[in-house]
Structure formats: structure tokens, C-alpha cells
Amino acid sequence: MGLFLPRAGTRSYPKWVYLPIMKRLLLMGLLVPALSQGQVLLVAGLDNRPGDLSAGSQARLLSEGLHGAKVDAVRYSDLAGARSWIRNHPRGTVVLFSAGCGWSDEVSVLVRDPARVWILEPWAKGQSTCRGVRAAVSMGVPVSHVVVGPNAGRGLGIVCAPARTPPGTGHLGSLRTLGRLIGR
């Protein structure tokens, strides 16, 4: 959870006092930057098995939680597409979901502000995903931005003290839940 980051100078403090305090709170994960319309990217989960939702359908679930905000999506296998989006939206928020979490470390390096990266229900049974998520956290992604489900297949055990999806929330339903958390 967090607070919206107010604009600099809106308090009765001078900017030279206010900005360093806000930056530190943001890096600690205690503040959540406000979202801009069209500034959210979802690196989606699997979409190639029967019953899987497409990347666009997964983005719609996240958008519902964000009160209808536009969410762009790339497939879990499209790192080049994610890189391109991040270059074009340097202040955007990136959500890595399920299989898309395999790129956690590489995406965290590209994003200007690690507090704008969310890692949702990574597959903790895969060693490369575990290494990537842990590397992302060591690069500044707040551990509170790693959101896990109830078992290792949904991220449990990947890092110490992560955020948890509410009990009874399904894997795909966690997209809506995260959208509500980010969109506050």
C-alpha cells in the first residue's frame, strides 16, 4: 500500500527540503507514484495453452482494476517490445505477470524509477525467474512490489516479506487486485 506522491512544492516546505524526502520515501516503497493515462505496460503471462487468456485480455483485467485506465501489453516472450515501450514511456509503470516475470531483472535495469515496477505472481519454481526477481529487488524494486499467491507456482517463497494476493483470489484475478492497489 502507499500514498500518492504529491507534486513538489505543494507543502509549506521549500523544494530543496521536500524533494529529497519524497524521493527517499518513494525508493523505500512507501509512496506510489500517481499513474498517467496510457502509461502502464503489462508483460503478460502465458497465452499459448488452451484456456489461457491473450495478452490483450490479461491487460483488460488489469485495466478493470485501474478504473479503466489504458494498459498496453506485450507477450511474455517479447522483451524487444517491452524495451521499445519503456524507451517511449520512460516514466511509465511496468507490471510483469506470471511468465512475464522472467524478465524482471532486465526490465528493472531499463525503467528509470524501480518503484514503477510491479512483479505479480512470478513462477517461483523456475530458477531463472527466481534469480531475475531477486536481482530486480536488489536493483531497487521495492519488495512490497513483489506480489505473490498461495503457492510456489504463484510466487510464494521467491523473496522474503512480499505482498500477498488476498485469499480466494485466482491467478488471473490477481491482475484486477493489483490494478486496484496501483490505482489508489
Image: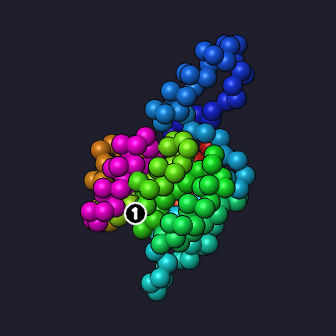
Q: Quadrant of the C terminus?
A: top right
Residue drawn at x 69%, y 25% is 8
| Above/below status of 90 relative to 99 | above
Q: Is residue 100 magenta?
A: no
**Three-letter amino acid code of the residue under disc 1:** Gly
Q: Secondary structure at mark 1?
A: helix
Where does the image place residue 183, in percent across and percent down from the top left?
A: 62, 47
In depth, the one of 107 and 41 nearer the eye is 107
Relative to 48, 33 lies left or right: right
Percent across and percent down for residue 135 are: 35, 49
Residue at figure coordinates x 33%, y 50% from the top left = 134
Stretch of the chain drawn in magenta: 125-148
- Left/right placement of residue 146 relative to residue 180 reads left
Residue at image mark 1: 102
Q: Tell me, what colour scheme is on the image? A: rainbow
Which is nearer the eye, 181 or 24?
24
Q: Residues within 10 Å of mark 1 (few under 14, many from 20)?
A: many
User: What is the tally of numbered marks visible in this picture?
Assistant: 1
Q: Position of residue 51 (x, y in %)?
A: 48, 83
Give the overall secondary structure of the magenta segment: helix
Q: Residue at left 55%, top 21%?
A: 21
What is the x, y in percent for residue 60?
Answer: 63, 67
Q: Is residue 163 above or below residue 156?
A: above
Q: Is residue 140 magenta?
A: yes
Q: Is residue 162 visible?
A: yes
Q: Specify the quadrant of the image occupied by residue 33.
A: top right
Q: Residue furthest bottom?
A: 50
Q: Residue at x 62, y 60 (%)?
A: 85
Asked whether residue 58 appears in the rendered view, the answer is no
